[in-house]
Amino acid sequence: MARIVMKFGGTSVADIARIRVVAEHVKREVDAGHEVAVVVSAMSGKTNELVAWTRDASALHDAREYDAVVASGEQVTSGLVAIALQNIGVNARSWQGWQIPIRTDNAHGAARIAEIDGSELIRRFGEGQVAVIAGFQGIGPDNRIATLGRGGSDTSAVAIAAAVKADRCDIYTDVDGVYTTDPRIEPKARRMNKISFEEMLEMASLGAKVLQVRSVELAMVHGVRTFVRSSFEDPHAPGMGDLLNPPGTLICDEDEIVEAQVVTGIAYAKDEAQISLRRVADRPGVSAGIFGPLAEANINVDMIVQNISEDGSRTDMTFTVPSGDVQKALAVLERTKETVGFDVIQHEEGMSKVSVIGIGMRSHAGVAATAFKALADRSINIRAITTSEIKISILIDGPYTELAVRTLHSVYGLDKQ
Amino acid sequence: MARIVMKFGGTSVADIARIRVVAEHVKREVDAGHEVAVVVSAMSGKTNELVAWTRDASALHDAREYDAVVASGEQVTSGLVAIALQNIGVNARSWQGWQIPIRTDNAHGAARIAEIDGSELIRRFGEGQVAVIAGFQGIGPDNRIATLGRGGSDTSAVAIAAAVKADRCDIYTDVDGVYTTDPRIEPKARRMNKISFEEMLEMASLGAKVLQVRSVELAMVHGVRTFVRSSFEDPHAPGMGDLLNPPGTLICDEDEIVEAQVVTGIAYAKDEAQISLRRVADRPGVSAGIFGPLAEANINVDMIVQNISEDGSRTDMTFTVPSGDVQKALAVLERTKETVGFDVIQHEEGMSKVSVIGIGMRSHAGVAATAFKALADRSINIRAITTSEIKISILIDGPYTELAVRTLHSVYGLDKQ
C-alpha cells in the first residue's frame, strides 16, 4: 500500500469521455490498495477562454478578479472527476483550494503556496476516500482565491504530495517522460528512467517544457518523488503498453540513481540576446548598479560573464536576456550610464544557449573540454560560457542550435541505449 | 442616498459587451450617490452546459459535486462584472457565497439560505465599494458550496437586500414587469406599477414566471421592496425610455398601495389533472392517509375539494396534480386503497386552473359570483372551485383556458388604463 498523488493535465480532462478514462485509471490505483489524491487542471482550452474574457473586460484587470474567474475552470473539473469516480463505485469528493486550505501568499495571478494543511485529507484517506483537488489555486491571506500562474497545477500536485507525505507524485502529461534532449531535434534522444531533482531543475529551467520549474524546486526541497508519465486517452487501444505501469521518468534524489551518468541531458534555449557593456568602471557596486535596475524592470537576465580587465580599472560585462526584452533592457541601461560609468553598449540578437547537464560532472574532469572540442570540430563559434557544478552553458549563434545539440548529444554517448 | 441591490440575469451578462452595459448601468446608480450591491447569474446557457456535463458524467450524481461544478458559472460573471466596473473607474470587488458568507442548509442542489452576515458588505459600502455577488450559491454547514436551485439568483438578491437592509432590490429581467395577465393571451394586459407581496406570491406560484417563488416569500417576510425592471441591452438605442428610471413593477407591502384594486390579476396554470376518489370512508385521518403517501412520492397536490357526503358515512374527494404526475399518483393511491377505503378512482387530464387574485377581495363581497356568472355566460363549465382570502381558483377544461382568462380579465375591468 502506497500513498499516491495523481495529477492530470487539461488534455486528460478535456471532455466527459476522457474524464471517464481518468476515473478508470484512478480506480485501478485504488483497487491496487493505494491511498489516492487526484489533482486536476481545467479542461483544455478553458483557461485560455477565461483569461481572454478577463482581458476583454479590461486590459488592466485586477489580479484578484482574474483569479476568481480563472480558478473556476479547475473547480468544474474537480467536481466532474469526483462524479465520474462515484459513478464507478469509488468513494471520492472534490476539494477547492480554500476548503483544504491551500494557503498562498498575496501575489494574485502568480501566487506561491505558503502552507497546506494535509490533516483532513489524510483523515479521509483512512476512510478510503479519494480526494479530487482543483489544481492551480489556493486561498490568499485576504481570504480570496489565488492562482499559482500558468502550469501551476504541477506545483499544486507536488505541494499536496509533500503535505500528505505521499510516496510518489505521478504527473500525467502529453509526453511520456523526460528525454536526454528534444526528440524533435535529435530522434535518437532516449527517455530517462530516472533523473535527479537538480538535473531536472536545470532541464526544466532551460526549456524542457515537461514540468513547471517551481514544481521541481518544491519536489527537491521536500524530497517528493515525482513520476512524469504519459496520459493515455484510450486504455483499450492496442500498443498502450503496460497500463498499470505506464512508462515515464522518475525525478528523485540522486541517492536513488545507482549508476549516475556523467552527462544526463542536453538542453537548449533559443531566442537569446547578448548585451555587452564595454569598459565598465571596475569598482564595488557596479554589478548591482547594472542588474538592479534590470531586475526592477522585470527583465530576466541569464548568463553573466565578466572578464578581468587588462589594467584593473575597466572591465567588460556580457550577459544574455530573452530577445523580446532587448529594447527594454537597452533603455534601462542607457538610464544607468551616468552612475555605472561604461563606455559603449553592444548587443546582438538571434543567439542560442545549449547546456550540458549531469550530476556526474561534479566528480569528472574534462567534461567541459569535451564539449568545446566537439563544437570546434563542427566550426561552431562559442560566444560565451558559464558553468555551474552540474551544468555547462554555451552561447552560440542561433542557426547552429540543432547541430550543436546533436553534436553534444552524440559526444557524451547519449545516443546509445 | 439609498442602498440598492441590483440583480442581473443570464441574458444581461451573456457576453463581455453586455457585461459592459451592466457596468455602465451600475455606475449610473453609483454616480447618483447610491450604495450598490450587484447580484449576478451565470452567462446565459452556461448553467445548462454545466448541468449537462454533470449528467453526462453520471445520471445519479452527488448533489454536492453538482453544486461545485454549477456554481462556477456565477463565480465567473462576478469576477468579470467587477473587472468591467473597475475599468470604468468604479471601486468594486467580487464576492463568492462562501466569502460573505451566505450560509445555507445542507440540501445541496436546492438549498435554502439560513443566514447572511451583511456586516462586511455594509462596512465596504462605507468605503464606497460596490459588492459584486455571485448569485445562486452559498456555503452549507459541511463547508461546501451549496446552490439554491434554478432561478436562485433572485432569492440571493432578495436575501442580500434583507441582510444589508437595502431600500430596494431591483431585479433586471427579460420582462419589464408584472402584468395583469399573460400578454400572449390577452394583448390588453397592463403592466402593474405596484403589487403587494401576497398577490405576487399567488401570481408567481400560479405560473407568472417573473420571479422565483421563494424570492417573493423572502421579500414578504423581510419586507424587501422588490422592483422587477427590464434589462436593456443597448442603453443608447432609441425608444429605451427613461434610462435612469426604467419601467417596472414594484412588489411591496400592501400599505404602500394607496388605491388597492379589488382584483389585480388573472393567473392560469395549464396541464392540470383532476383525480376523484368516490365514496371515501368519512372518518378522522382519511385525508392524511391519502395525501401523506402522495407527498412522500413528491407529487405536488394543488386544489383539494371535499364534498359533504349525503349520509355522513362516505364522501367524495377531488384534487388536482400536474398531468405529468397522474400515473405515479394513481399507482400510489391504488396502494392506499385498503387502508383508506374508497370505492373507485376517476381521473381526467387536460384541465386548466384559472385564478382571480386581489387583495381587495378581502373586503368586497360578490367577487366570486361575478367570475362564475361571466364564465357561465361563455358556456365554460366549472369543474372545481377553491378559494383563499385573496384568490379564487377555478378548474376548467383546458381548451377554454384563453377564453376564460380574457373573460375574467375583462369582467373585472383590468383592460382599462
Image (cartoon, coloured by chain):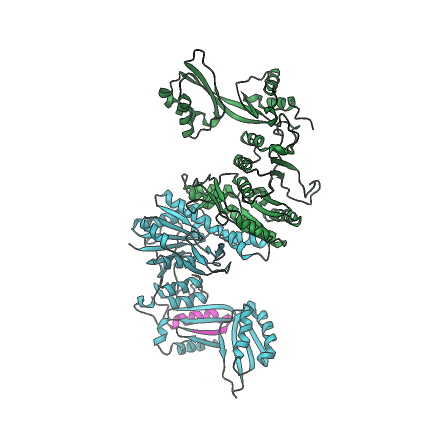
Chain colours: A green, B cyan
The residue under the point 51% across, 58% down is: B109
Residue B407 lies in the magenta-colored region: yes
Q: Which residues are magenta?
A: B392-417
For image coordinates 57% across by 42% down, the residue present is A9
- Residue furthest to the right in view is A238
Residue B293 shows up from this direction: yes
When the figure is inspected, residue B307 is found, relative to residue B147, above or below; the finding is below
Q: Quadrant of residue A220?
A: top right
Q: Position of residue A368 (x, y in %)?
A: 59, 20
The x, y position of residue B57, in whole percent, is 59, 52
Note whether residue B275 is visible.
Answer: no
- Name the quadrant containing residue B4: bottom left
Q: Magenta stretch: residue A304 in it?
A: no
In the rendered view, does B19 fall on the left or right side of B274? left
Q: Closer to the camera, A32 or B342?
A: A32
Seen at 63% across and 53% down, the residue is A88
Instruction: Give percent across and percent down for residue B170.
Output: 37, 57
Residue A139: image location, x then y, percent: 46, 45
Q: Is residue A136 above or below residue B162?
A: above
Residue at the image point whose x is 59% and y is 57% from the top: B59
Asked whether A290 or A299 is in front, the reply is A290
